[in-house]
Image (cartoon, rainbow, N blue to C red):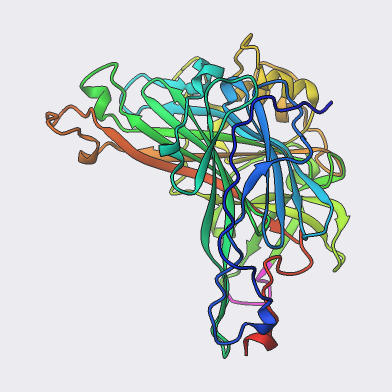
């Protein structure tokens, strides 16, 4: 059943600028893009949770988004359900059921600290946000049943979306709705952020800030460590059924022959499983639906990851209680099952499961990828593990700190991924002209 947001504090953003002229009549001038869109409460509330939540939507020049955001306890800020309108007069299409940070794993290099931060988090871990946090292009949102705002909604210019300098001088700037919240985990604050772009893409980012570990000073304040984030993205593309997980690879041979080609094929032979990232093949995973676009291609999304390196951790080799096997892979795909989802979310804080259990099925027969169910023509969940390496440096000092002690607030370390449209549209969704209009 749909629920009603009972306490939404949201202001309409002013629409600035004039309506955009079609590309065909913009000659020898810069096309600056549509007027800044405004975020507003959903006309139809699509939220499906009893946890604190709100539903917001935004209409861009060519596309529109509506989404639920909620505080789901130790999972923090959760995005979804999320719908996309691909044309101004088109129908809403379901894209996601929900997406969130599944876990944050923080292993230290030279200390016996292997922290699963979500283990200690709860609904109160999501902190208050202020207008100063939101900045000039944002508003703060108060979720249902809450007394303080916990979410920021920003509408941002995201830079050039496309341009053409061959003859005619035309360009288009893109827009995005950014929804973010802060989850406090002891000495670190995590910024959980989702970006809904006007080209149909969705960004997932986590920023780590705060101060270095103060509990074993001074060594812990200068110890290098990782912030590994496991993302869970429940894709319901055009509805919960009919989706197939796929993997994309680029094959290039040394002899520059015609054997160089790209491959799109079922993920892991069509079964649940894990995979390692190979940057040499541009390897990635995605989802395609049974629905076809106007060119006869299945509509879909593909992951685009943002990584400065691959983190691997070896708890099993170190005879640790938690084996850290989930860190040996970068992607995973599972088939959605309500029982697995409910055990994973554990909103009532009854039991904490760690990734080796709920994703790999270690000690929990049939959980996650362990039962190797089909991920073809079904309801698919994508997983990705991103990493940020923090080797403390002098910029982590506060004024007056001694050389061996770092008590300063660190600048944000970002990591994440995006879902990029793959045949989701029949043509450039942001009005990109044909070659004849550029010449």
Q: How many marks?
A: 0
Q: Nearer the viewer, residue 262 or 129?
A: 129
Quadrant containing the N terminus in the rendered view:
top right
Q: Nearer the viewer, residue 38 or 342?
A: 38
Q: Main secondary structure of the magenta part?
A: loop
Task: Choose top left, top right, bottom left or bottom right for residue 256.
Answer: bottom right
Q: Relative to residue 305, is residue 83 drawn left or right?
A: right
Tell me residue 402's x, y (percent).
12, 29
Q: Residue at x 65, y 12 (%)?
A: 348
Q: Residue at x 81, y 38 (%)?
A: 379
Tell me residue 130's x, y (percent).
44, 33
**Image: 331 above or below 266:** above
Q: Relative to residue 156, is residue 342 drawn left or right?
A: right
Q: Residue at x 80, y 56 (%)?
A: 299
Assess whether residue 103 is covered by the magenta stretch. Answer: no
Question: Magenta segment, which residues?
Answer: 255-261
- The answer to whether residue 65 is visible is yes
Assess whether residue 257 is covered by the magenta stretch. Answer: yes
């Amino acid at each position: 059943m749909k629920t009603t947001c009972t306490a939404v504090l949201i202001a309409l953003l002013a629409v600035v600028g004039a309506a955009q002229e079609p590309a065909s009549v913009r000659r020898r001038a810069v096309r600056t893009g549509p007027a800044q869109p405004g975020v507003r409460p959903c006309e139809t509330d699509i939220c499906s949770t009893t946890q604190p939540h709100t539903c917001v939507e935004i209409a861009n020049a060519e596309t529109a988004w509506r989404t639920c955001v909620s505080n789901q306890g130790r999972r923090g800020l959760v995005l979804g359900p999320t719908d996309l309108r691909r044309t101004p007069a088109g129908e809403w299409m379901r894209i996601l059921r929900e997406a969130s940070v599944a876990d944050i794993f923080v292993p230290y290099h030279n200390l016996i600290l292997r922290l699963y931060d979500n283990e200690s988090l709860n609904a109160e871990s999501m902190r208050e946000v202020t207008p100063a946090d939101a900045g000039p292009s944002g508003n703060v949102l108060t979720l249902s049943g809450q007394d303080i705002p916990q979410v920021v909604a920003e509408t941002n210019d995201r830079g050039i979306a496309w341009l053409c300098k061959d003859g005619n001088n035309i360009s288009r700037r893109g827009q995005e709705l950014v929804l973010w919240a802060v989850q406090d985990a002891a000495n670190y604050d995590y910024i959980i952020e989702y970006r809904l772009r006007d080209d149909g893409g969705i960004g997932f980012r986590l920023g780590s800030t705060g101060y270095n570990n103060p509990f074993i000073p001074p060594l812990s304040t200068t110890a290098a460590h990782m912030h590994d984030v496991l993302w869970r993205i429940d894709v319901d593309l055009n509805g919960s059924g009919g989706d197939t997980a796929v993997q994309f690879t680029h094959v290039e041979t040394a002899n520059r022959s015609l054997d160089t080609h790209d491959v799109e094929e079922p993920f892991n032979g069509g079964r649940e499983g894990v995979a390692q990232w190979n940057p040499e093949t541009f390897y990635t995973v995605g989802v395609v639906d049974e629905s076809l676009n106007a060119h006869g291609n299945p509509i879909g999304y593909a992951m685009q990851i943002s990584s400065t390196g691959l983190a691997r951790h070896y708890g099993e080799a170190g005879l640790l209680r938690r084996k850290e096997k989930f860190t040996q892979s970068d992607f995973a795909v599972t088939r959605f099952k309500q029982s697995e989802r409910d055990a994973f979310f554990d909103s009532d804080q009854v039991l904490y499961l760690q990734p080796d259990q709920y994703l790999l099925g270690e000690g929990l027969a049939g959980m996650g990828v362990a039962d190797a169910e089909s991920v073809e023509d079904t309801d698919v969940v994508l997983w990705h593990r991103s990493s940020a390496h923090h080797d403390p440096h002098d910029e982590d000092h506060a004024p007056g700190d001694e050389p061996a002690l770092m008590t300063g607030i660190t600048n944000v370390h970002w990591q994440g991924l995006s879902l990029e449209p793959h045949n989701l549209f029949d043509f450039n969704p942001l009005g990109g002209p044909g070659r004849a209009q550029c010449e």
